[in-house]
Amino acid sequence: MFTGIVEDLGEVKSIKNGRNSMQLTLESKKIVEDIHLGDSIAVNGVCLTVISFSDNLFTVDVMPETVKSTSIRSLQMGHVVNLERAMPANGRFGGHFVSGHVDGTGVILRKRKVENAVYVDIGISEELSKYCMLKGSVAIDGISLTIFDVKPKQLTVSLIPLTFSETILGIKREQDVVNIENDLLGKYVINHLEQKNQSSTLTMDFLRQNGF
């Protein structure tokens, strides 16, 4: 489990491509300071497992399904990535519940500066759209952000200067692909309601009729 608060920017130092899989070696002094074999590390919001480490480097395997369904497949040597170690039980919870299980990808449509903020419009699929709500949480490339505008197949987030300078959203450009993880709690609620359990009076229509 992660919080969506990026700890460090790492650099891709090595990529070994299998037929449908990958093995990445990443550089990050801060992450390796407290790392163990089998640890979970969020790389651009994707939960990956440490299989080896030394000095300032650590290596993770990327399985075929992850390569297929996330932006990890587009990484190249020298690319910079967001990194976050799993949340410690005694740590502060600064973001929101982030599992590291990416739901899909989106495309940056527009970035624009508004005073001290940078607004980022992101195009997403209809499937991802149904989990988005005004003022709700979303993880974009592993960054915990608040949705402040929602349109059909599009969401907008606002970056404060620190997020802009300390994460890869600051350097990504229009048409770049980003990983999207919808709010975990919201997904559970919607999934339950979509089961259409006839024995329950709690349905999507009931919630709409009562102002939710």
Image: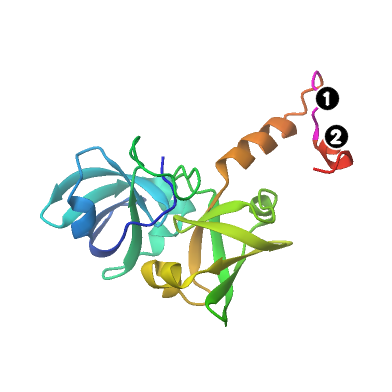
Name the residue: 70% across, 50% down: 130
Q: Amino acid at mark 2?
A: Phe
Q: Nearer the viewer, residue 1 or 110?
A: 1
Quarter containing the C terminus = top right
Tell me the tag on residue 206. 2
SS under mark 2: helix
Segment tinted magenta in the rendering:
199-203
Q: Is residue 179 left or right of residue 208?
A: left
Residue 70 coordinates in the image, percent (x, y): 46, 55
**Residue 69 higher or lower than 123, as above or below:** above
In this picture, residue 34 sits left or right of residue 167: left
Q: Vertical placement of 114 versus 176: above or below?
A: below
Residues at marks 1 and 2 touching, judged by CB atoms closer than 8 Å: yes
User: What percent of the width, then of the height, locates residue 62?
Assistant: 33, 48
Residue occupying the point 49% across, 71% down = 176
Residue 18 location (% of width, % of height): 29, 52
Residue furthest right in the image? 209
In this figure, which residue is indicated by the disc labeled 1? 201
**Which coloring applies here?**
rainbow
Circle 1 SS class? loop
Reply yes or no: does residue 200 show up in magenta. yes
